[in-house]
Image (tube, grey):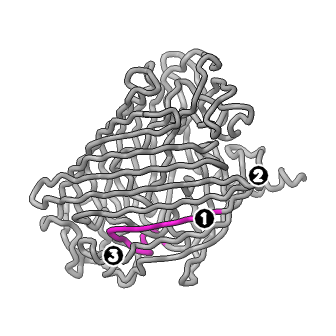
Amino acid sequence: MSVKNGVGRAIEWLALTASTSALVLACPLAGRSQSADPLGESRQAIAPALSGTVSQARAIDSSPSARDLTGNDPQGLSVSLPLRPRFPDLVGEHRPPQQGDRGGAIAQIDESQIATEEEPGPQVSFLVLPQYSSRKGIYGKLDLDISQIGDNHHSIELDLEGGERTLGGKLTYTDPWTEGNPFDPGFRVQIFNTREPEDVFREGDPEAELIHDHDPFVDRLGGKIEVFRPIAENGLTLSAGVGYQRVAIRNAAATDKVFSRDEFGNRLTLNDEGIDNILTVSLAASQDRVDDRWWPTQGYRFRLGTEQSVPIGEEEILFNRISASYSQFVPLGSHTLAFNLQGGTFIGDVPPYDAFSLGGTNSVRGYGGGEVGSGRSFVQGTAEYRFPIVEDLNVPLVSRLGGTVFVDYATDLGSGDTVVGEPAEVRNKPGNGFGFGVGVRALTRFGPVRLEFALNDDGDAKAHFTMSDRF
């Protein structure tokens, strides 16, 4: 048995884990054929040439199997038609470090060199996946995406989940480019309702729960409208939006009971009735200049956003939230040094359920989610050394395997006691934390998958598994 095939067999379980009990159904509409892409229209992006110019470009299938899982063409730039960047994340969702920047970019392209081919018809992808987390328990997740609708590739996405400790869904409609020109604006509309425990109200000693030892469930009901527009060939994209959400604290996913304070009398909402109304307007700028969206080895990503609340209701919540994230990838031959720095702060009111939560898979590994703290402000940094193990795997659903050595650090800058209700202080969370460890990374048909083992500065160990990249 070759080393390559031996390693491939050894990690075949990773592919099965990434697709455990997953049902993917792709069916082209209107009698037109197109390969399935379970991640939908968001895959269709233009990867930038780091030199800023393109000597060669070609139109290719936009599915991961055709492009993302094999890497970019070393002789030029692989391009999906239509020539349009992937839209940025909804403004108002930039709550580092809980989410990373996944924006797309536009390279400088000579359109005369791009081969044209017939536009595919609407594409439907359907994914059912059982999952487990310490926060949500055992639950099921259903994703239905209808993408590539019409000439401008509109998309409709329905995400539902329900189970032991979670219940909710999101419905999103996107027009990625309203006029058909890569520099024209696009828009996205989303409505949502989610009910689940959140890390701010978990972990720590002592535990601070609701009466009868129930965890606080955060019920978010609302919607968002966003307009975004690329403004330069280097991929810089600006976005603006408005959002509303009604936030209630409950003692279970399926109940009408609301709570404004925990069992010790600490405030959970600003409204004494246990229901807050938040109206926000947002602005954001993002840029993605990496060589490969799903397996980057060089380039950078950044995002800067601000969100201003408009006082409404009896609680009249007033704040401005500013957050930023920057990632740099430095090639060392076939190896990569990866760095990420994030920071943010609130000016004004800080609702406890929206405080910056530190610790966990996407923050400081070696800690549980929210175990480090939750504050008005934060700074977080990560350094990783990434190296290839197998570049071309003959394993179903997996194309690459790599390893990583990492170190994480985060601090709330001593701001935990300035959050309404002081959720971190009453749970005796440290407010800063350090973690380091090793991990295995795989590039699958469903995107990056990570399995990591970490130690924190208290000497505790924790394993982390997730189906997303670190940043």
Q: Looking at the image, which residue is at 38% across and 62% down?
A: 344
Q: Position of residue 59 (x, y in %)?
A: 63, 24
Q: Residue at x 69, y 59 (%)?
A: 386
Q: Is residue 381 magenta?
A: yes
Mark 1 Cα shell of 10 Å, populated few (<14), some (14-19), many (≥20): some
Residue that numbered label 2 is attached to: 334
Q: Secondary structure at mark 3?
A: helix
Q: Quadrant of residue 177?
A: top left
In terms of secondary structure, where does tag 1 sit? strand
- State which quarter of the image contains the C terminus: bottom right
The residue positioned 66% from the left and 26% from the top of the image is 57
User: Which residue is disc 3 drawn over?
Assistant: 416
Amino acid tagged 2: Ser
Q: Amino acid at mark 1?
A: Ala
Q: Which residue is drawn at the image coordinates 13% and 65% (left, top)?
A: 273
User: In this rendering, does residue 25 appear at all?
Assistant: no
Q: Is residue 348 above or below residue 43?
A: below
Chain part drawn in magenta: 368-384
Q: Is residue 21 visible?
A: yes
Query: Residue 63 at x, y = what percent?
Result: 60, 33
